[in-house]
């Protein structure tokens, strides 16, 4: 049995691969989300102790972390478990970092806020998700800021707890370059902020839109992972890992 941490495009891909090769698995997400795979969905945040207990009870032979790149607490928790269970990180694709005067990469939210203030930016368009509202309080409390978040109640609840004005909430997902350009034009921010979320997060399109309009864009670098993880990026690597660690691949995958 395998334990998959998903809730992302990568998580769905892993589940699809496991369905194809007839491997049994649990699919874990922090909140309850629609799931159509053959695996057993489980919901709720898991502590180190709960993960260890679950793995022992369910005889987990392999853990696949396919969660969001910025799910730092989960990444750290999984890397700390006291079990001899192989730990796989199914990574998304990332493009090469852009070298341009309008593109700035930072290591933390604190560094981003300092950069905003140092450059006297008066307004901000944050495409970094609802979880970053609290992290950027040091800027938006005193400067005009818009956040794009998902159009769902859980996201609205987080925004409400942060006391962020709903008049400056935008709803939606990352878009193509032209649609992002239209958004930037309508908001006309002094600076754009986002995360290094890779190809699936349409980071390249966000950057291209900013460069087209000559708007500065600040990008939070993706967090580093523990070297306990075996990082893989393809279906072929995942199937090979299954074969090497647990066997049981029964279906022709060619």
Image: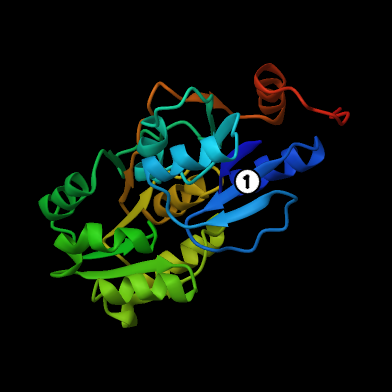
* Circle 1 SS class: strand
Q: Is residue 159 above or below residue 180?
A: below
Q: Position of residue 172 (x, y in %)?
A: 51, 68
- Between 215 and 45, which is closer to the camera in this rendering? 45
User: From where the camera sits, is residue 186 visible?
Assistant: no
Q: In this view, which residue lies farthest toward the bottom? A: 167
Q: Quadrant of the N terminus?
A: top right
- Residue 173 visible here: yes
Q: Quadrant of residue 155?
A: bottom left
Q: Residue at x 37, y 52 (%)?
A: 194
Looking at the image, how many numbered discs can be counted on the residues? 1
10 shown above or below 247: below
Where residue 153 appears, as percent x and y from the top left, is 46, 76
Q: How is the image coloured?
A: rainbow
Relative placement, left or right, of 105 versus 152 is left
Which quadrant would residue 129 be assigned to in this image?
bottom left
Q: Which residue is mark 1?
A: 26
* 200 up-or-down from 226: above or below: below
Q: Which residue occupies 49% across, 74% down?
A: 152
Q: Nearer the viewer, residue 98 or 157?
A: 157
Q: Position of residue 108 (x, y in %)?
A: 24, 43
**Residue 252 located left or right of residue 87:** right
Q: Residue furthest top?
A: 244
Nearer to us in this view, 33 or 187: 33
Residue at 34% across, 37% down = 100
Residue depicted at 14% across the width and 61% down the height? 138
The quadrant in which the C terminus is found is top right
How many C-alpha atoms fall within 10 Å of the one at disc 1: few (<14), some, or many (≥20)?
A: many
Image x and y of residue 134, in percent: 24, 62
138 to the left or right of 94 = left
């Amino acid at each position: 049995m395998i334990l998959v941490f998903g809730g992302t495009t990568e998580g769905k891909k892993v589940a699809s691969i496991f369905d194809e090769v007839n491997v049994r698995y649990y699919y874990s997400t922090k909140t309850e989300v629609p799931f159509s795979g053959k695996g057993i969905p489980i919901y709720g945040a898991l502590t180190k102790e709960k993960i260890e207990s679950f793995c022992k009870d369910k005889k987990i032979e392999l853990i696949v972390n396919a969660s969001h790149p910025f799910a730092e607490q989960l990444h750290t928790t999984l890397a700390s478990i006291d079990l001899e269970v192989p730990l796989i990180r199914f990574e998304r694709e990332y493009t090469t970092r852009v070298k341009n005067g309008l593109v700035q990469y930072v290591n933390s939210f604190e560094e981003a806020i300092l950069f905003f203030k140092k450059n006297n930016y008066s307004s901000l368009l944050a495409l970094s998700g609802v979880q970053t509202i609290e992290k950027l309080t040091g800027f938006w409390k005193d400067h005009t800021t818009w956040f794009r978040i998902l159009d769902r109640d859980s996201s609205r609840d987080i925004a409400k707890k942060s006391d962020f004005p709903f008049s400056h909430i935008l709803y939606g997902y990352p878009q193509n370059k032209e649609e992002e350009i239209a958004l930037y034009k309508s908001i006309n921010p002094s600076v754009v902020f986002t995360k290094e979320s890779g190809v699936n997060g349409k980071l390249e399109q966000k950057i291209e839109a900013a460069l087209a309009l000559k708007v500065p864009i600040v990008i939070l670098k993706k967090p580093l992972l523990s070297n306990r993880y075996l990082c893989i990026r393809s279906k072929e690597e995942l199937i090979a890992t299954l074969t090497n660690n647990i066997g049981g691949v029964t279906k022709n995958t060619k």
